[in-house]
Image: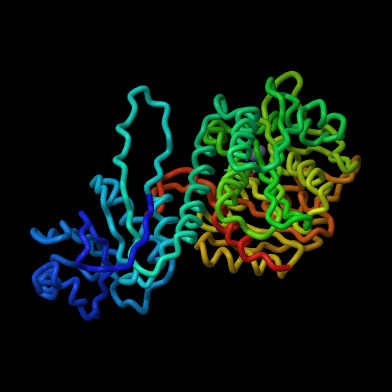
Amino acid sequence: MYQVKDLDWTDSYDTIVVGIGAADTIDEGLDALYNGRVKSLIQSADISTKTGELSIVPTFEGTVKRILFVGLGQRNENTTENVRNWFGKVAKEIKARAFTDVAIALETFESNGALFAEAYEMATYEHPTYKSAPKDSAAEVTITLLGNVDQTEVEKGAARGRGVNVARKLTMMPANILTAEALADYAVELAERHGFNHRIVEKEEMEGLGMGALLAVNQGSKLPPKLIVLEYNGAGEEAPIAVVGKGVTFDTGGYSIKPKDGIVGMKGDMGGAATVIGLFETLATTKPAVNVLGVIPATDNMISGDAFKPDDVITAMNGKTIEVLNTDAEGRLVLADAVTFAKTYDPQAIIDVATLTGGVLVALGTDVTGCLTNDDALYGALEEASRETNELVWQMPYFDVFINKVRKSEVADLNNSPGRFGHMIFGGAFVGEFVGDTPWLHLDIAGTSERPAANELGPKGPTGVMVRTLSTLLDGWNR
Ligand code: BES
Ligand code: ZN
Ligand code: ZN
């Protein structure tokens, strides 16, 4: 779909996309397409140079039918984030108008083909639906990236966008369709398509391994849990980086049941798992020089005569006992055993990704992912990657006062819910009890996994957050 060529204003395309700044000297080749009238078209406001404004102006004759101008305002004020957003806007416009032959004059944006491809994939994505009348499928489009463009980098950018879309699609799927088993099937299919090692740990095996925390959460369910394991190998025998994603396919809260308005939307409680699977989709193309272990504890959190209850004491895979004070704090329980399982691979680092707490929404809102870490250098690398992708992160304090409260119980080693105040941190600190000394990042995406409104880069709803940031982090891994 993407092809690469040098910019030549005399080549013929249906549509060329051109960035135009307020103080630009107009290129002669461009001007020639309008018989020397670009200046006057700007003066008459038919071509806007205002930041982020699109103008589509036909040429009426010549080799190019029309130019889609993107206003760049003052060029020196532009950031990668701006350009990515404008590319998203352009992508939506191409789709809405069903343009099929489009060239992008990248030099006029002082940008690169990878960024365009990433934005194009994300912005043209639509959530699949189950409506009985199918939508018309979109027209096939050829996009020519003009300039000194590296085709391999373009494919990597597109792969980051596709990874995001895989995560979005999975997160959107309802829990009657996306069961733990269906999630496992999806992961296995993806792994086989890309030649990744994979393994599904079944319920009986979990019992043998002593995964009492994951099994407790699954206890009320009619459906068996699955522990999904994916392996990307890009560095021979080196220790892997473990990426662990919460895969609660539906969270009722269990006996600590959620209020009726709080239950709606809980099909998205496997957003962390979706991020891990989307990341693996991306890794198949970006091929970073690291090994990556993906671990997903998948189950729903249901109520029945068999369900676990508040006051229950359960034993996790590492032998630690847990007093269950709240069955709605189930994410940290499934992560506990998944992290212990990941540690059997001797990982060099552990990154967990989870829609873990409403607390992070209260603290940081819907645009910032809350983090805990035991390793400042690793957090620094995450922050740097997140600045590149514009997926914002913020570090929360991982102080002993929080850890001590997680360890406070009269009957067990730990409790799963020390209280309301600061509960985003308690959630992370609980997971930290299973991580130990391994360098660790905890990413609470409960606020960022879904977006309350559409933006330039995608629809309302699931965002596939952290796929691009983790991909970028792994690309630049050097420790
Ligand atoms: N899945 C929820 C967190 C959540 C809330 C995700 C809102 C997305 C949107 C999690 O399992 C949960 O219920 N957390 C509780 C923790 C509490 C019981 C300590 C919460 O946030 O209230
Ligand atoms: Zn819950
Ligand atoms: Zn949950």
At 61% from the left and 33% from the top, the residue drawn is 183
34 sits left or right of 270 in the view: left
Task: Let me know if residue 363 appears in the view.
Answer: no
Quadrant of the image occupied by residue 184: top right
23 sits left or right of 80 in the view: left
| Residue 193 or residue 158, whichever sits in front | 193
At 22% from the left and 57% from the top, the residue drawn is 13
| Residue 362 or residue 171, whichever sits in front | 171
At 19% from the left and 73% from the top, the residue drawn is 29
Above/below status of 198 relative to 68: above
At 30% from the left and 77% from the top, the residue drawn is 74
Residue 402 percent coordinates (x, y)? 77, 57
Above/below status of 9 relative to 253: below
Q: How many marks?
A: 0
Residue 37 percent coordinates (x, y)? 9, 72
Display coloring = rainbow
Above/below status of 351 relative to 174: below
| Residue 421 or residue 165, whichever sits in front | 165
Residue 181 percent coordinates (x, y)? 65, 27
Q: Quadrant of ligand 2?
A: top right
Residue 332 percent coordinates (x, y)? 73, 44
Task: Let me know if residue 50 appears in the view.
Answer: yes
Quadrant of the image occupied by residue 323: top right
Quadrant of the image occupied by residue 404: bottom right
- The quadrant in which the C terminus is found is bottom right
